[in-house]
Amino acid sequence: MEQDTRRRLEDVLDREIEAARSLAATLAAERNALTGDSPQAVEQKTAEKVQILGAIEQLDAERRNLWDTPGLAATVAERWRALMELMARCRTENEVNGHIIHVRLHQVGQLIDIVRGGPAITYGPQGKTFAKALRALARA
């Protein structure tokens, strides 16, 4: 019975590792889409990411149920370590993508301010930012 449970646990971990690899690839594709000019590509990659995260969550629940069997932790340590490394990399990739989104939102906000005639943020000779009033492009 313990051997069967160990095999099932190893199988779940292998599927989690594969899902984490898919997530890493999707995050890389999402980053490319975020730096591109296709909102549809961003939406598609985001939807793929959400789907993969759902699968990972289901596998995580399955693994937790199997993990409670005594003596199994040592036999799957290598797979667990690989999974944790992949998930850490995915977390970092997702944070980078989030930063890209934040920067893009800030850039769009600045462009909207310029078009509306609001203050434009510029840099002075010392490298410090300050608002400089410009006339609205819409009036030009």
Image: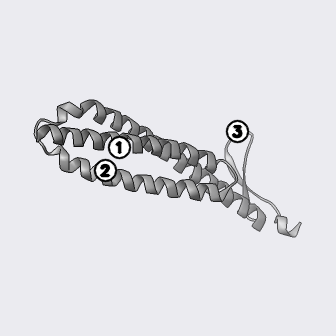
Residue kind at label 2, given as amino acid type: Leu
Residue kind at label 3, given as amino acid type: Gln
Question: Could you say which is closer to the camera, residue 53 or residue 100?
Answer: 53
Instruction: Quickly name the residue at label 1.
Output: 15
Q: Residue at x 65, y 58 (%)?
A: 39
Q: How many marks?
A: 3
- The secondary structure type at the circle numbered 2 is helix
Quarter of the view holding residue 38: bottom right
Residue 97 percent across, percent down from the top left: 54, 47
The tag earlier along the polypeptide, 2 or 3, is 2
| Residue 140, placed above or below residue 94 | below
Quarter of the view holding residue 89: top left
Q: Residue at x 69, y 58 (%)?
A: 110
The tag earlier along the polypeptide, 2 or 1, is 1
Question: Could you say which is closer to the camera, residue 1 or residue 128?
Answer: 1
Residue kind at label 1, given as amino acid type: Arg
Residue 75 percent across, percent down from the top left: 20, 31
Q: Residue at x 67, y 54 (%)?
A: 107
How far apart are labels 2 and 1 at the CA level?
Answer: 8 Å
How far apart are labels 2 and 3 at the CA level?
Answer: 54 Å
Q: Going by the image, does 140 lie left or right of 111?
A: right
